[in-house]
Image (cartoon, grey):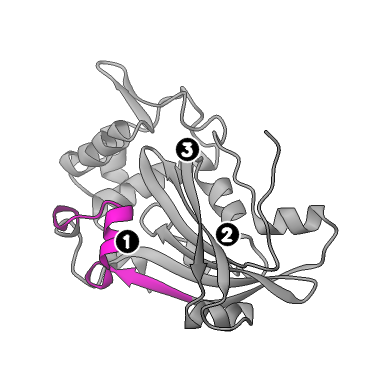
Amino acid sequence: MDMTKKTPVYQRIKNAILDNIHRGKWQAGEAISTEMALAEEFGVSRMTVNRALKELSEERVLERRQGSGTFVAQQQFNHTFVEVRNIAQDLKSANRDYQAQVVSKRCITAGMLDELLRRKFDIEQAVESQLDDEDATVLYEVKIIHFADGQPIQFEERWVDAIKVPKFIEQDFNIVNTSDYLIAKIPLERGSYTIRALAAPDEVANALQIEVQSPTLVLRRQTYSAGKVLTFVRMWHAGDRYQFSGEL
């Protein structure tokens, strides 16, 4: 899918600015290109560029100083604010053999959104109307089985903001860990999670090779960047193979 045909021009400008920041072209506290220069680079009006800069300023990525220009905000890109551990790290730390198997990858369009995803990512009709059409990709979805010593131990269902991380879906998640990739691309400022005991539905039971309705532990986590949800994930664990532990 050609994302450039589906993504509004102002959003493409935002993505280009973010990419330059992540690659280190523009460091925290440094000025970025002027509105006029960006308008010439993208072949658009200054009004379109102004919208992109305004939104990035509202998201605390940029800081606009009257009479001086637009600068990379100091607090946003100096480091990742939260540590997000993943099952690959945990299993390797325990000297267990780790493997991942991608079950499915797909693009979620505005017209496919269910109420849960619409609410989690705060996607309203007003936002959708800014997209080119109902076929515009707004989220990516991946489903992955994680194995420990050849036994399925976690089934991951993850949704990611496709506009903020446009190349996410192109990665080989049999090799690349989803959390590691996101942290490398977008600094995370905070997160929240819940853990619940639930009976395994058919898809989860098949993935974990357990009986349908068997007990599972489900970790639901969402992480934020620039004040908005970047990714939402459900991680299902076979109840008799996994436990959560830590120190207080």
Q: Which residue is mark 1?
A: 117
The answer to whether 158 is drawn above or below residue 1 in the figure is above
Quarter holding the N terminus is bottom left
The Cα–Cα distance between marks 1 and 2, rounded to whole angstroms, is 18 Å
The Cα–Cα distance between marks 3 and 1, rounded to whole angstroms, is 19 Å
Residue 151 painted magenta: no
Quarter holding the C terminus is top right
Q: Nearer the viewer, residue 241 or 14?
A: 241
Query: Which residue is drawn at the image coordinates 81% and 67% (left, top)?
Result: 97
- N-terminal label among 3 and 1: 1
- N-terminal label among 2 and 3: 2
- N-terminal label among 1 and 2: 1
The answer to whether 246 is drawn above or below residue 218 in the figure is above
Query: Which residue is drawn at the image coordinates 29% and 51% (left, top)?
Result: 11
The Cα–Cα distance between marks 2 and 3, rounded to whole angstroms, is 17 Å
Is residue 205 something one can see in this rendering? yes
Q: Which residue is mark 3?
A: 190
Q: Which residue is mark 2?
A: 178
Residue type of the residue flagged with mark 2: Thr
Is residue 7 something one can see in this rendering? no
Q: Nearer the viewer, residue 190 or 196?
A: 196
Q: Is residue 8 left or right of residue 174?
A: left
